[in-house]
Image (cartoon, helix red, strand yellow):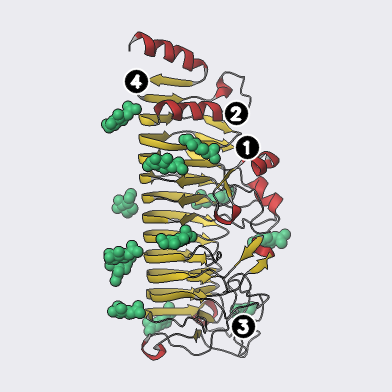
Amino acid sequence: MNFWLLTLCFTLAKAWVVNEGTTCTLYPEALLHHGQAVDDSPSIQQAFDMCGTNGTVIFSNNLFHVNTVLNTTNLLNCDVHLRGELRFSTNIPYWRTHAISVVLQDQVTAWLFGGTNVNFYGEGGFYNGNGQAWYNANKNESNQPGRPMSITFYNSTNLLVDRLRVIQPQFWATFVWDSKNVSVTNLFVNATSNSKWGTMNTDGYDSWKSDQLLVENATIINGDDCIAAKGNTTNLLARNIYCEGGTGITIGSIGQYPDMPDYNINTTFENVKIKNAMDGAYIKTWQGTRIYTPSNGDWGGGGRGLVKNITFRNFEMENVGLPIQMSQCVYSADSNKGCNTSKLQIEDVKWQNIHGTSRFNIASSIYCSDERPCPNITFDNVNITSVNATRHLPYYDTDIQHQIFQCTNVIGQNSSGIPCNQAAPSNFSQWIYGNVDSTGLATLT
Ligand SMILES: *[C@@H]1O[C@H](CO)[C@@H](O)[C@H](O)[C@H]1NC(C)=O
Ligand SMILES: *[C@@H]1O[C@H](CO)[C@@H](O)[C@H](O)[C@H]1NC(C)=O
Ligand SMILES: *[C@@H]1O[C@H](CO)[C@@H](O)[C@H](O)[C@H]1NC(C)=O
Ligand SMILES: *[C@@H]1O[C@H](CO)[C@@H](O)[C@H](O)[C@H]1NC(C)=O
Ligand SMILES: *[C@@H]1O[C@H](CO)[C@@H](O)[C@H](O)[C@H]1NC(C)=O
Ligand SMILES: *[C@@H]1O[C@H](CO)[C@@H](O)[C@H](O)[C@H]1NC(C)=O
Ligand SMILES: *[C@@H]1O[C@H](CO)[C@@H](O)[C@H](O)[C@H]1NC(C)=O
Ligand SMILES: *[C@@H]1O[C@H](CO)[C@@H](O)[C@H](O)[C@H]1NC(C)=O
Ligand SMILES: *[C@@H]1O[C@H](CO)[C@@H](O)[C@H](O)[C@H]1NC(C)=O
Ligand SMILES: *[C@@H]1O[C@H](CO)[C@@H](O)[C@H](O)[C@H]1NC(C)=O
Ligand SMILES: *[C@@H]1O[C@H](CO)[C@@H](O)[C@H](O)[C@H]1NC(C)=O
Ligand SMILES: *[C@@H]1O[C@H](CO)[C@@H](O)[C@H](O)[C@H]1NC(C)=O
């Protein structure tokens, strides 16, 4: 170590970044302040400033308090090792006014992270979003303004995130935005509430405007989308995924903005287990007209685009409310406004080897708008039986005592492999709470 580095090391040790060569090792401020929850964000920021280019940042095996936003972007050739706990503060007014914008749906993030040739290794450490405070404050509403995503991978090329564990995320756990060649492997997310309030909006993995994505070996226990490929997600492969609770694996929602068409092309989801969830394997778009949608806190709809070459393969469902769906009216299904107006084209979608049980008497609802009927929608070896049918019990509160497969505007329906036996209503909801009857809608929504 030369004199300059020695001086630096001495100076920085006080700030709890120990710098040796190109490696910065972080220790929590609390060790110097009698265990007080002093904010470690400035030291974290400093470690990335010093070692974020051609270097290594190590979070030692300690508890770190993150009380202010983190912006560690534009890293280059950097390895990050997370060995301790990152505990995010529950100062809701602070985060609501300071979290960093991610543009999409006016949402925000607590940590913006990214760069080129970056590896993030979760080596026994974890991200603790302290989400219970957010779940309680949110009171089962949707998209509370200023509620931050845990970590956003932004403007990144060649990024590997391995063994990241996110416990009680504040909002969406991980988000990939404006990036290319990002692999998230061995991800673990657990958003479980211990109060009477649920974990709405705790998506496990979402992507937007990104290409060449891999998600391999994920376990996601949550209260919303397990994986959601939002607009302009292309060439995503997600495999070996376990989803529990929540609303399954989806392309969408897309088609929110008229001035930004969404192209979602070449995506495969395979080897997926979905347990005790509202939804399974599906595609959701907004309607074709712009409507103020309180449940989403925003205006939306009217977006065009294309969903093409999507495969859902080898899925095992267990007690899933709506195992397979295509909806073109996801946010105004309840009010049934403009449900048959979408101009967002969906084509070339396969469901292959899909097995297991549904909660109600419906296996699938495939709806395409009159404006854009769908070619090449196929089922191959899809066998879903309701939980009650497997027990030889009847269905309740319905006049239909068999499994339903709804279809509307499916081009070439007879050769699709879908055993269509009912028309799909344009306003069929993603959220159903009871069996479907001969009106085509669920008896409880
Ligand atoms: C980082 O490494 C690259 C390639 O090895 C080199 O071209 C660049 O100059 C280095 N940057 C700094 C700031 O050391
Ligand atoms: C984040 O940091 C980068 C520098 O790496 C800076 O250019 C950018 O403006 C910062 N973004 C925000 C929202 O602070
Ligand atoms: C995105 O990353 C590139 C390097 O790949 C950098 O040149 C550019 O400034 C970054 N953009 C933003 C908005 O940070
Ligand atoms: C998820 O978190 C809940 C609540 O803390 C806990 O009971 C459960 O065991 C956790 N699940 C896993 C797989 O860690
Ligand atoms: C909130 O939503 C969750 C999940 O849907 C549900 O289990 C819980 O009962 C709801 N809480 C209240 C108080 O309505
Ligand atoms: C995913 O899990 C499988 C089975 O445990 C393992 O063989 C594979 O290497 C894992 N993939 C990654 C990227 O760690
Ligand atoms: C998606 O990509 C297309 C074509 O590259 C572009 O016109 C459109 O604005 C993009 N949409 C979004 C949501 O970024
Ligand atoms: C469809 O996407 C898959 C990857 O999900 C890719 O392997 C295949 O080549 C694509 N097919 C076409 C016709 O582009
Ligand atoms: C889809 O995959 C095919 C085959 O690999 C490729 O030729 C095409 O460029 C991909 N489309 C997009 C939008 O990436
Ligand atoms: C339908 O699928 C076939 C076979 O995969 C393909 O050749 C054709 O281009 C597809 N048509 C459309 C409109 O996607
Ligand atoms: C579908 O699954 C059910 C229950 O899992 C089973 O009894 C039935 O034989 C299967 N049907 C086919 C065609 O594989
Ligand atoms: C399944 O059967 C049970 C027991 O008879 C009944 O309480 C329940 O309502 C049935 N579920 C459905 C979805 O019909």
Residue at screen point 44% across, 44% down: 164
- Horizontal and vertical percent position of residue 102: 54, 49
Q: Disc 2 designates what residue? A: 39
CA gap between label 3 and label 2 equals 52 Å
**Label 2 near label 1: C-beta < 8 Å?**
yes
Residue at screen point 61% across, 87% down: 437
Q: Earlier in the sequence, mark 1 or mark 2?
A: 2
Q: Disc 1 designates what residue? A: 89
Give the label on residue 21, or none: 4
Q: Nearer the viewer, mark 4 or mark 3?
A: 4
Q: Earlier in the sequence, mark 1 or mark 4?
A: 4
Query: Along the horizontal axis of the image, is 441 left or right of 7?
Result: right
Q: Secondary structure at mark 2?
A: loop
Camera sees residue 75 = yes
Query: Along the horizontal axis of the image, is 330 left or right of 125?
Result: right
- Horizontal and vertical percent position of residue 352: 36, 75
Q: Amino acid at mark 2?
A: Asp
Q: Secondary structure at mark 1?
A: loop
- Is disc 2 surrounded by few (<14), some (14 to 19) or many (20+) residues within 10 Å? some
- Is disc 4 surrounded by few (<14), some (14 to 19) or many (20+) residues within 10 Å? some
Q: Earlier in the sequence, mark 1 or mark 3?
A: 1
Using the image as rendered, state which of residue 420 and residue 244 is in the foreground.
Answer: 420
- Is disc 3 surrounded by few (<14), some (14 to 19) or many (20+) residues within 10 Å? some
Q: Earlier in the sequence, mark 4 or mark 3?
A: 4
Give the label on residue 441, or none: 3
CA gap between label 4 and label 3 equals 65 Å
Q: Earlier in the sequence, mark 4 or mark 2?
A: 4
